[in-house]
Image: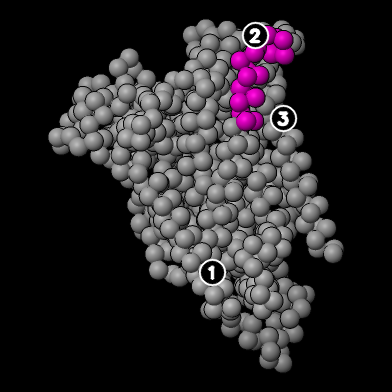
Amino acid sequence: MDRTVPSAVSSPAGHSGRGEARERTLELRTPDFKTTPLSRGRAGKTRSRNVSRANLYWKAGSLAPAVAILVALSIWPVFNLLHLSVSSVEWSGGEPVVEFVGLRNFVELFSDEPVYWAGVKNTIIFAVCAVTSQMVLGFAMALAVRRASKVGRGVLTAIFLMPIVIPPIVIGAMWRLMLGRDFGIVNFLLAIVGLGPVDWLGDARFALFSIILVDIWHWTPFVFLLMLAGLETLDQEVFEAARLDVVSRWQELRYVTIPLMLPTILITLAFRIILSFKVFDEIFLLTAGGPGTATEVINFSIYRVFFGQDRVGMGSAMSLLTLFAVALLIILANAVGRRRKNGRAAA
Amino acid sequence: MRSGLMNTRHLGTAGGHLVVWGYALIILGPMLWIFSNSFKRQIDILMGTTIAPFTLSNYEGIINSRQSQFLWNLFNSAVVAVSSTAAVLLIATLAAFTIIRLEPPRWITYLLLGWALIFHMLPTLTFVGSWYVMFSQLGLLGSYTALILTHIVHNLPMALFLMTGFVMNIPKELVQCARLDGCSYRQIFVHVIVPLSLGGMAAAGALAFIASWSDFAIALNLSNKETMTAPVAIATFAQEHQIRYGEMAAASVLSMVPALVFILFGQRFVVRGLLAGAMK
C-alpha cells in the first residue's frame, strides 16, 4: 500500500476508536471514497491538523524525559567535575564553598599522588587477569556442554545466574567469611591437604590475587552463558561438513569454531575489561584497598579522596582523568569493533 | 574407526559436563556457607566450626535491635528499586519507540545512544562525587529523590538499549497499519507497542530492578541514616571494630531473596535481558 492516499483520507478518523477506523478503511474501497474528504469539510481538516500537532508533541515529548535526565545527571556532572577539578572546596554547613585554584590539583595528581597511580596499575592488572581467565574458562565450559541434552539445563542456568544477580556486596561478605585467615573454610580445606594457613586478604602478596579469584568466580558464569548462546547461534551445517571430513575435535576447534566466534570473543573481551574498571563493592568489603596499596583500585582512590579525606577538588581531578581515559578506550574499542564488522560485511 | 571417534566425542562431552557441574558446585559452595553461617553464633563462626548449634539470634539481632533496623533498610531498597525501575521502563520504552519507528533527527539518535553507551561503561564512582556536590547544593542529600534519580540515570542506558532492540523486533508493518487506520502516535504506543513489548519490558525491568537493588557505590555516598539501603547496611556490619560476621551473613541472606525469586520465577526474562544486553 502506498502512503499518500491513506494519510490524506484516514486522518479525519484520528481520534475515533479502532472499530470505526477500520470501517472507514473499508469504505475506501467503495466507489464514493473520493467524496469522503470533501464531504468532511473544514471540521475534518482541523481535526487532522490537531492530530499531526499532537503527533509532533508526542515525538518531542517522548524523547524529552530520556534526554533531560541524561543531560541533567550524566552530562552536567562532567562539566561540574571540570569546574570542581580546578577548585578548592571547603564545606561549611553542608554547603560547598568553591574557590578557583587553577591547575594545582592536576599538577599534584601527576606529581604527588602515588596511591592513585598504584590504583591505576592494580586496576589494569586486575582487569586483564580476571577477564582473560573468565573468557578462557567460560569459553571452554561452553564448548564442553555445547551439544548438551536439555536435561538439567534449567537447573544449571539457575545456578550460573546466581552470582550475576545477587548484590556484589553480598559476594564480598561471602568471600570474607570464606577467606578469613583463622576461621575461613578455604584455609580449613587447605589444612586437610597439609598446606599452612594463608592470609588471603591480609597478606600483600596474596590480596590482589584473592580479589582476582573472587572476580573470576563472580563473572565466569556470565561469560559461560554468553558464549553458550553465541555457540548455539552458529550455523550447524559448517560443523556437520567438518565432521564429514572427519576433522578431529582439536582441528574443529582451531579451524572452525574459534574463527567463527572470534569477533564475539574479542568484542566481549574488550568490553568486559572496560566494564571491570567499575569494580568497587567487593574490594570495599574484602580489603578496602589494603594491605598498603596492594589492592588499591582507581575507584577506591576516588572514593577515599572524595569522601574520606574531603578533598573534593583532587577527587574531581581523579574522576575526570579516569573518565576521559576510559571514554577514550570505549570509543577505540567501538571503532575497532565497527571496522571489523564492516570489513566482514564487505568481504 | 568411525565409532571409536564418536566414543571419544561422547567421553569428551561427559567430561565437559562433569567440569561444568563441578563449577556449579563451586558457585553453590559460598552460597551455602554464608547461609549456614547466618545460623551460627559469632563464637562458632570465629572458631571455624563447620557444624554448630542452630540459632536465630543473628536474624533477631538485625531485625529487632537498637543498633540496626535491617527491615527498614530492606524497605528503603525496595522503595528505591521499585520507583526507579518503573521510571526507567517508562522513559526507555517511550524513547525506544520514537527512536526506532518515528525517525527523529539523526543527530539526536546518535548523540543519545552514543552517550548512553559511553556513560553505561564509565565507572559509576567517577560520577558519584559530582552527584554528591550537586545534591548537597540542592539540599537533597540523603533523600529518596536523590537515590531514585541517580538510579534512574544509572540504569537508563541499559534499558534504552534493551528496549530499542525489542521494539525493533516488532514488525514495522504493524505500526504502518495502525497509522493507516488513523491512530495517532500516542494510540500506536499504547495499543500496539506496549502490549507487544511486555516481554521485553519484563526483561529490562528485571535487570533494572536487580541493578538498583544491588547498587552500593551510589547509595553508600548519597543516602543517610534514614534512607540507608540494604547493601550499605551490610557493609556497616563489616566496618565496626568487632566485625559482626553472623549478622553480616544474615543480612546478606535476606538481601539475596529478590535475586533468588527472579531466578525461580523469571529466569527466562533475566537470561533474555542479560544476553540481549551483552550482544549489543
Q: Chain of mark 1?
A: B
Numbered disc 2: secondary structure:
strand
Q: Which residue is mark 2?
A: A88
Q: Residues within 10 Å of mark 3 (few under 14, many from 20)?
A: few
Residue A176, relative to residue B256: is it above or below?
above
Using the numbered discs, state the Cα–Cα distance from disc 3 to disc 2 in whole angstroms.
23 Å
Q: Earlier in the sequence, mark 3 or mark 2?
A: 2
Question: Residue A153 at x, y = what percent?
Answer: 43, 64
Return the mark for residue B143.
none
Residue B188 visible, this angle: no
Amino acid type at image mark 2: Ser
Q: Nearest to the eye among marks 3 and 2: give it.
A: 3
Q: Chain of mark 2?
A: A
Numbered disc 1: secondary structure:
helix
Residue projecting furthest to the right: A346
Q: Chain of mark 3?
A: A
Amino acid type at image mark 3: Ala
Question: Residue A255 at x, y = what percent?
Answer: 72, 63
- The residue shown at (66%, 66%) is A252
Q: Is residue A167 left or right of residue A105?
A: left
Q: Quadrant of residue B232?
A: top left
Q: Nearest to the eye among marks 1 and 2: give it.
A: 1
Magenta part of the chain: A108-125
Return the mark for residue B9.
1
Q: Which residue is mark 3?
A: A325
Residue B28, relative to residue A141: is it above or below?
above
